[in-house]
Structures are given as structure tokens and as C-alpha cells.
Image (tube, grey):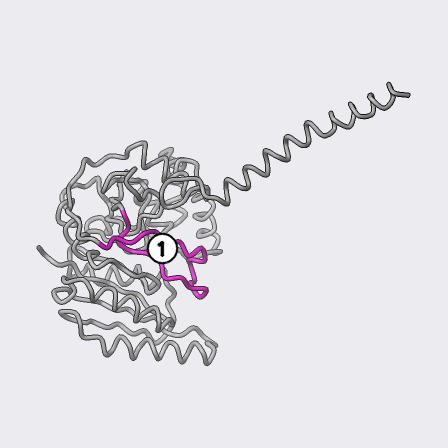
Amino acid sequence: MSFSPILLFTYNRPEHTQAILDSLATNKEASESILYIFCDGLKENASEENRIKNEQVKKIIKKETRFKEIRLQIQEKNKGLACSIIDGLNFVFSSHETAIVLEDDLIVSPYFLNYMNTALSAYQNDKQVGEIGGCNFFACGPKYPKYFFTNMPDTWGWATWKDRWEKFNEDAVFLYKALEKNNKMFAFNTYGAYDMEGMLKEQIFGKVDSWAIRWQAVMVLNDWLCLYPNPSYTNHIESINATHAKANIIPPLEQNEPTFEKIEIKEIELTTKAMKLGYSGKGDYFGRYTRKYLKKRLKKIIKTVLLFFVPFGIVQIFKNNKHKK
């Protein structure tokens, strides 16, 4: 098995940085893997607290020794997450053919690297596959297959190939027009389950700075699919400090050594339905309606019933009283 380089992006969360390094080091392939760590610089007028945390992160990554090789890139100025990831991938792909990407608010399964490296090798020549995903947050459990494909890329622990990433386009306006021209906006919007189009517009007008929404557009425009595992090989560390993940979605994490099997490259209705349910905010990790959604639905039904029957009941009471008189 060949071992892909790992890219880890950090900034000012020392506890999280230590947690992702510790969980990653439980993978037996870690000692055979090159780890690139990109630490972003401080923002202008950063608080003293952020300065301290940024320095703590630097100390942690400088003392890390559990991998075959550590290659540090510490920025003096703040680049932001989107620019950091885009530049980091471009840099690593200048000398490697594959890459595994992690951010500092994740933890991984002890079998994460095994899965990623095996899947990257298995689907390298299958150009329909744009990405290998690690976090399954909508189709976990025995109801679903061990592995499956969807058209939505994963951003919480993922991997890809140089030739796929070379098609990445930073121009959000171009991507938006291409999606419209090729009638792919519906697919881009998770088949109508989520307003990805709105997020891409926010990217265009500078309201967000997201590499992920642009990568997603590239995936859809190229008709690429993303491989997902069941259960997940990564999940999100609960954090009120997470910049881009306030929901703290934490799916079940794989704790048993799996047997990888290559599957047919196509979407199936069962997992696509679960994906749509999850992206709509109505579903959980197991493709079921959430309790929150069911309660909301029940309240709406009760309200509708009351609006229909209560006025009718009042009229009947009035008629009965009038008849008694």
C-alpha cells in the first residue's frame, strides 16, 4: 500500500490540534505517512487570547514526532481557511499525486488512514470519482450499504487526486454561470434539499469565503461522485469556537477494522434519499426524521386540527344554547 501525504490545517485551537494529532497517531499507517501541517498566522488586531492560543498551537506542532516526517508551514500573516486550504493543496500537489485533508476540529477513527489510502488506490483510474469522503452524517447503520456514492463532496476528512484537484476553479461567478448553463443547479442544490446556490451567491458577493462551495460546484459540473463509508471514519469535535461548524454534527465513528470492497460507481435511491433528508435538516445520521422535526410536524398538525374543529365546535355550542332557549 502506498501512503498519501496528510494535510492538517490549524490556527488557534491548541486543544483541538492536540486531539486531532492524537487520534491520527492511533492509525498504524501514521508512522509511514508524511504530515504537512499548515498553521495560519494571526489576524490584524488579534486579541491577546488569540495570540497565546496561536503560540500554543505552534508549540504543539513543532514537538510532534509520531509520523514518518513532519513538514511545517507557519504563516506570519492570516490567510483565512479558504486560502490556506487552496494554497496548501496546490503546494502539496506540486510533488504528490494524492492528498488526505484534515482540519483541526476533527477526530478520526484508528482505521481512517487505511480506508483513505485503500480507496484512493482503488478508484485512482475511475475518473467518475472526484473524492473520497470520511464523514458520513446522513446514512449510517445496517439499513445502508458499507460504502456508497453521492454527488455531494465531504469536507470533514477527505481525499482526492492531483488530476481532479487541477480542475478546481476559484472563480465563483464562472462556476455559477456554468451550473446554470448546464442545467446542474438542481443537482448542486442537493436535488432541491438545500440552498447551495444561495451560498455560492454569498461567495460571489463576498459574504462568505468558502473553498468548499466552489469545490462542490466543480464536483457537480464534472459529474463526479464522492465515496462515503458506513459508519463514519471522522467526526467533529464539539466546539463553540468552530468557525464554520456551529451545528456540531457528530455521527457514529468506526471503531472496528473494516474490509474494504470496491463498489459500482453510481448513486442509489436509498442513500440519496437519506442525503436529501439530512441536508434538508429533517434527518439524523441514520436516515430517520429527527425528533425536533417530528415535534414541529406534530405541532403543525395539531394547530391545523384546532383551527378547523374549534370554530366548528363553538358554532355548535352556540346553536345548542339557542335551541335550549
Give the magenta range: 231-255
The residue singled out by tag 1 in the image is 211
| Residue 240 forms part of the magenta stretch | yes
Q: Is residue 303 left or right of residue 95?
A: right
Query: In the rendered view, would you say 24 is above or below 124?
Result: below
Instruction: Label 1: state its secondary structure.
Output: helix
Query: In the rendered view, would you say 102 is above or below 163?
Result: below
Q: Main secondary structure of the magenta part?
A: loop
How far across and down, in percent of the image, does residue 122 sit?
Answer: 13, 45
Quadrant of the rendered image containing residue 80:
bottom left
Q: Is residue 64 left or right of residue 78?
A: left
How far across and down, in percent of the image, does residue 262 sit?
Answer: 15, 41
Q: What residue is drawn where x is 50% and y is 42%?
A: 293
Q: Residue furthest right?
A: 325
Q: What residue is drawn where x is 87% and y is 20%?
A: 324
How far across and down, in percent of the image, does residue 197 sit?
Answer: 44, 43
Q: Residue furthest left?
A: 1
Along the viewing direction, whichever of 324 and 85 lies nearer the viewer: 324
Give, as a three-letter code, the residue at label 1: Trp
Query: In the rendered view, would you say 130 is above or below 40?
Result: above
Along the viewing direction, whichever of 171 and 2 lies nearer the viewer: 2
| Residue 232 forms part of the magenta stretch | yes
